[in-house]
Every structure is written in structure tokens, then in C-alpha cells.
Amino acid sequence: MEPVLVTGAAGGRQGSTGRHVTRLLLERGRPVRAFVRADDARAAELRSWGAEVVVGDLREITSVIPALQGVRRAFFTYPVTEGMLDATAVFAAAARREGLEQVVEVSQLAADPYAGTPHMRRHWVSEQVFDRAEVGAVHLRAAVFFENLAVVADAGGGRELRLPLGSPETVLPLVAAADVARVAAGLLTAPAGEADPICRLTGEIMTIGQAAKTFGGGLTYVDQDPEEWRREAMALYDDTVAVEHLSHLWELFRVIGSGHDLYQVTEAIERIGGRPPLTLHDYTSTPSSP
Ligand SMILES: NC(=O)c1ccc[n+]([C@@H]2O[C@H](COP(=O)([O-])OP(=O)(O)OC[C@H]3O[C@@H](n4cnc5c(N)ncnc54)[C@H](OP(=O)(O)O)[C@@H]3O)[C@@H](O)[C@H]2O)c1
């Protein structure tokens, strides 16, 4: 059986979706070619699970073409940082050249040409590039990962969840990165050509006040001044693209606020992923270790 190429396989701070996908596919007996940026301890662990590891840079065509040779299906993810459109163009061109039948890629819930954050707009452009490449693209339009709030909770010293979201009643659509990966694995192991090209993934909808209480035995939500948040975020994320994206994202949620029915838990997580969505409570009580 030909391997599935999984990018982002080492995992990172934003969701480790690629690492989850690697584990899930191997558990199902599918060979995995794991694409990593560095041959480090995480890569060694992937080998110990049974994955074939290839090292390269997703923005570099001479890394990506060889990685896709002999592959029919792939999982593509790229973190919120500089270079996503470069990586998308490289990966889509290489996938087209190598004749892939399916590329499952991580996008964002509100990807749209006029979305409220620059990075969501880039995700929409990225979706278009994959569509034009005709490689059976499926776009996983995911809500805010639980992991995103966990980074903020960790920074709050076990007492506070500090975000510029206005009232504690501000509502957020959320999902576990592990559920995004479970859906990806379901798609990558299903018969080809059956999936809708856009797959929206929201696992739980809750207020930021409720979310804070769910972490670490109960944190207090603190409505932080947006400018102060932005300054502190640079120390936390050390990435201008991530801080720009998150600043706009929190502002959007703050303006939308509460008392609306814009968000819905999506059925695709259970239908394709094979089990009901994880809740934030599940996630905080038994953090999933990919
Ligand atoms: N966070 C959220 O709330 C949220 C919500 C919805 C959608 N999303 C989407 O989820 C995606 C990020 O999740 P994720 O699970 O992929 O993030 P992640 O856990 O940070 O993992 C990213 C992986 O990509 C690798 N990588 C980074 N740059 C690379 C390069 N140039 N070449 C090869 N590999 C590279 C990293 O390797 P190293 O660690 O070695 O650098 C890491 O293993 C983004 O598309 C984001 O928009 C996120």
C-alpha cells in the first residue's frame, strides 16, 4: 500500500494536527511518510511509531516533490506564521505534478476573501490554489482550537485567562485539534472522491467565562485591554503573523459578542471522525497526547 504523506508531523504548539494524523493512520495500518522540518527527538519518536520520516522545508519545491513521489493522498498543514502561501503554492504544484488524488488541508472556520483577519483571507487564497490544482482538495475549516486557549491559560499562572474579548458572555466556537485530525484520518482512509470540498469543524460552543472556569480547576476570565494584550502576546508567541492574526480574531469575537446563533456544532466530526466531538472539559481533564 502506498504511504500517506503527512506534513507538520512533528507537531507544534498550535495543535499538533499532523502528529495526531500520523498516529491515527498508523493505528489503522496505513503506512505514513512523515514530513518534518528537523530530524530531532520528535522525528525519532515518529520513526519508533513506524513512520517513514522525510526532512525538508514545505516552502522548497526540491523538498516537496521527492516527498510526494509514490504518494496518492496527503495531509497538509502549515502553522500561523510567515510563508503559508509559499508553502501552499509549492505543495499544490508538486501534488499536481505527482498526480495526487486527495489533499486534506487545514483551513479556518471563516476563510473568505473578505474575512476579518489577514490570515483567514490567506487561508481562502490557499483553498483556491489547492482547488485549481485539481488534487481532490478537502478544506478543513476549523473553529478555534482548545490548544489556542490552553496557551493563554498556561500564561495566566494558574489563576487567570487574560484575553481582549470584552464581556465574559462573549461566545467562541471551539474544537479539539485531535478531532480535526480524526476527521482528516477518516477522509484519508475513505474511498476517494466522496468528500465535500469544504468541511466545517466546530465541536463545542461556549462563552469565554465558561471556558475559563473549565481550565485548571477554574480560572478567572480577565478582559484585557487589546493594546496591552498585543504587547504581551509578542513575548508569548514571538511571531508577528500569529500576533496580528490573533489580535484581529479576538477583536472579531469581542464585537460579535453574545446572544446570537452564528455558530453551530458540526455533524462532520462524528460522521467522519467516528465519535462525538471532544468537549473542553474532556480536553482539560485528559489532555490528548499524540
Ligand atoms: N490554533 C487555532 O486555534 C486554529 C484554529 C483553526 C485553524 N487553525 C489552523 O491550524 C493550522 C496550524 O495547526 P498545526 O497543528 O499545523 O500547528 P502546529 O502544532 O504548530 O504544527 C505545525 C508543524 O508544521 C511544521 N512546520 C512549520 N514550518 C514548516 C516548514 N517551513 N516546513 C516544514 N514543516 C514546517 C512545524 O515544525 P517545527 O515545529 O519543527 O517548526 C510543526 O511540526 C494553521 O493552518 C491554522 O490556521 C488553527
Image (spheres, grey):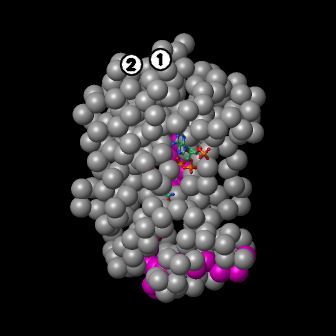
Label count reads 2
Q: Is 8 on the left-hand or right-hand side of 76?
A: right
Is 199 or 153 nearer to us in this picture? Answer: 153
Q: Is residue 73 visible?
A: yes
**Residue at label 2?**
98
In the image, which residues are magenta?
158-183
The residues tagged by marks 1 and 2 sit, at their Cα atoms, a distance apart of 6 Å
In the rendered view of the protein, which quadrant contains the N terminus?
top right
Q: Residue at x 70, y 80 (%)?
A: 159
Q: Within 8 Å of ligand 1, the CB of disc 2?
A: no
**Residue at label 1?**
69
Q: Is residue 160 magenta?
A: yes
Q: Secondary structure at mark 2?
A: loop
Q: Position of residue 221 (x, y in %)?
A: 58, 82
Q: Residue at x 59, y 38 (%)?
A: 37
Q: Position of residue 107 (x, y in %)?
A: 40, 49
